[in-house]
Image (tube, rainbow, N blue to C red):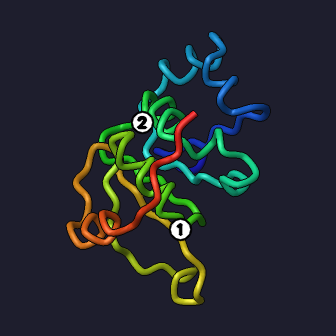
Amino acid sequence: KCGDHHQLHVFTGDARESLTLPHVRDHFHSIPPVNVVFQDAFSFRKCKKLWTTQWFRQLSEFLAPGARLATFSGSNQVKKSLIEAGFGLQNSKTSLQSKGRASILAYYQSPSDPQLITALERSPVSPLHD
């Protein structure tokens, strides 16, 4: 527990498998929806299954509307996967971006910044799928 209103839950193992286990699902359904996710998986080139539209949809089952998802990835393919899964992207400068490192800040069931959508529409890459 982190203060009066925050809790940190850490599960180890394969994330996609863990979220299908009955005791993990029961746990998440017994607590308030998750408000923040830090997606710190290996790059999608090394571990594609944690960057696909299907993964983000699976994860979103446990999220509150407006929940934030932050990641160090700046990939247009990941951005498109998040949008397909129901996340909105916002153009926000973080300390990492100011140091030249890409990152994404997405909000579940929220609108995307229209400028980001326009830029993504020009990108020839496709979302990642299983």
Q: Position of residue 114 (x, y in %)?
A: 20, 67
- Tag 2, which secondary structure? strand
Residue that sits furthest to the right in the current view: 13
Say which amino acid is labelled 1: Gly
Which residue is disc 1 drawn over?
74
Which mark, residue 106?
none
Is 125 above or below relative to 7? below
Residue that sits furthest to the top in the current view: 22
**45 relative to 13 in the view: left or right:** left
Which residue is disc 2 drawn over?
63
Q: Position of residue 122 (x, y in %)?
A: 32, 69
**68 relative to 58 in the view: left or right:** left
For the C terminus, the quadrant is top right
Query: Between tags 1 and 2, which lies in front?
Result: 1
Q: Residues within 10 Å of mark 1 (few under 14, many from 20)?
A: some
Residue that sits furthest to the bottom in the current view: 99
The residues tagged by marks 1 and 2 sit, at their Cα atoms, a distance apart of 22 Å
Residue that sits furthest to the front in the current view: 124
Instruction: Name the residue nearer the viewer: 7 or 82.
Output: 82
Give the residue drawn at x 47%, y 63%: 76
Q: Position of residue 91 (x, y in %)?
A: 34, 73
* Earlier-in-chain disc, 1 versus 2: 2
Q: Residues within 10 Å of mark 2 (few under 14, many from 20)?
A: many
Is 60 above or below relative to 37? above
Give the residue drawn at x 52%, y 89%: 98
Q: Are marks 1 and 2 in contact (CB under 8 Å)?
A: no
Is 27 above or below relative to 107? above
For the N terminus, the quadrant is top right
